Image (cartoon, rainbow, N blue to C red):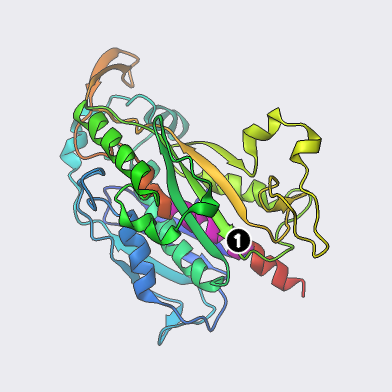
């Protein structure tokens, strides 16, 4: 099983949703970086369950404990080990699906691949794993603090925030529980999620991420293209079904004369349909991309399914689940973006 992510800056994780703890080991982090522990915990607080009325009500403090690689507040260059203890598991909520495969979950595929599975909340395949990624991403943000990464909810179901990101005040993203910096759109999104939740259903949405102050030259022209690495990172996040950067799928409708980003004498471009990346390499313009999340698979309705014996049966969701995963996924998108950019930034430094 692959449990590691990254090249020079590498995260290896462990743990299950209903185990004693989750955690990770970060290799390749440079020595001498002062760690802002409060900032790391704040990123976890943005992702943790139970933070508002529109997310799962599982109550986890998600307090990170660093075990190694940091001395007197500074990184030492050694492996950074950390754990996050699970404190609010309700494993009995999953007794009904011990032998039953939940539709659109990893139950069936995991069982067929490994011949064993942890039915409690999905075990290793649970989105709880992403708390580890947020810790690593929070440290990566501090390593490349000259680069600004801002993600936000841009749609929930058929409710879209139509303002271009250049008109948004990113400082308002955290002022709404849905993490949309446009207040009018945020209210519509919240109303939509509450409506869906009352029906015992779930809803999907999109997150937009904007990266500013990116230096020219991150990424490779062949197999380590920057946008490919970002795409892999985003598609590793639970429930993600789509990734597009720059003009994305809309660019497929355009002519070259409309789509080309014409240069200014200083190397900047008059437009930015390339999304800050050309030929797999950052060009210094803003990088922006959008990530699509499917509806959460566990719904509070009866569904037909099958069990490990191949028998038809029914299942009804139980326990505490997000009606829409998007608001809690915003810090995860930022974390994985930071991990990729920090990794590529270190690769560039090694060449100098």
Q: Is residue 266 above or below residue 322?
A: below
**Which residue of the protein is positioned furthest toward the bottom in this rendering?**
72
Residue 126 visible in the picture: no
Residue 333 on the magenta segment: yes
Residue 77 visible in the picture: yes
Q: Quadrant of residue 214?
A: bottom right
x 80%, y 65%: residue: 266
x 34%, y 44%: residue: 184
Of 302 and 102, nearer the camera is: 302
Of 260 and 242, nearer the camera is: 260
* Left or right: 92 in relation to 48: left
Of 172 and 34, nearer the camera is: 172
- Would you name the residue on which mark 1 appears? 341
* Left or right: 169 in relation to 234: left
SS majority, magenta: helix
x 70%, y 52%: residue: 277
* Left or right: 17 in relation to 243: left
Q: Position of residue 345 (x, y in %)?
A: 65, 67
Helix, strand, or loop for circle 1?
helix
Which region of the structure is painted magenta?
332-343
């Amino acid at each position: 099983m692959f449990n590691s992510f990254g090249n020079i800056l590498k995260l290896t994780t462990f743990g299950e949703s209903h185990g004693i703890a989750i955690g990770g080991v970060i290799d390749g982090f440079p020595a001498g970086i002062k760690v802002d522990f409060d900032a790391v915990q704040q990123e976890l607080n943005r992702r943790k369950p139970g933070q508002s009325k529109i997310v799962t009500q599982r109550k986890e403090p998600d307090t990170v404990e660093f075990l190694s690689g940091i001395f007197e507040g500074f990184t030492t260059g050694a492996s950074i080990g950390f754990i996050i203890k699970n404190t609010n598991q309700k494993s009995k909520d999953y007794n009904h699906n011990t032998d039953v495969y939940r539709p659109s979950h990893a139950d069936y595929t995991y069982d067929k691949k490994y011949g064993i599975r942890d039915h409690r909340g999905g075990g290793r395949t649970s989105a709880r794993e992403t708390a580890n990624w947020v810790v690593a991403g929070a440290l990566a943000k501090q390593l490349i603090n000259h680069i600004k990464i801002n993600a936000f909810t841009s749609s929930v179901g058929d409710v879209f925030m139509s303002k271009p990101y250049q008109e948004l005040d990113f400082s308002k993203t955290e002022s709404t529980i849905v993490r949309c910096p446009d207040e009018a759109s945020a209210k519509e999104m919240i109303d939509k999620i509450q409506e869906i939740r009352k029906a015992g259903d779930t809803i999907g949405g999109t997150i937009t991420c904007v990266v500013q102050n990116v230096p020219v030259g991150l990424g490779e022209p062949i197999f380590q293209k920057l946008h490919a690495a970002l795409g892999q990172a985003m598609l590793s996040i639970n429930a993600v079904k789509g990734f597009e950067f720059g003009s994305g799928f809309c660019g497929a409708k355009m002519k070259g004369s409309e789509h080309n980003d014409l240069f200014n004498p200083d190397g900047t471009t008059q437009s930015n349909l390339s999304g800050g990346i050309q030929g797999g390499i950052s060009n210094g313009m803003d990088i922006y991309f959008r990530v699509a999340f499917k509806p959460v698979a566990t719904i509070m309705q009866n569904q037909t399914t099958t069990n490990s014996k191949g028998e038809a049966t029914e299942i009804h969701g139980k326990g505490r689940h997000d009606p829409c995963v998007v608001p809690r996924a915003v810090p995860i998108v930022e974390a994985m973006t930071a991990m990729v950019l920090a990794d590529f930034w270190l690769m560039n430094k090694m060449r100098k």
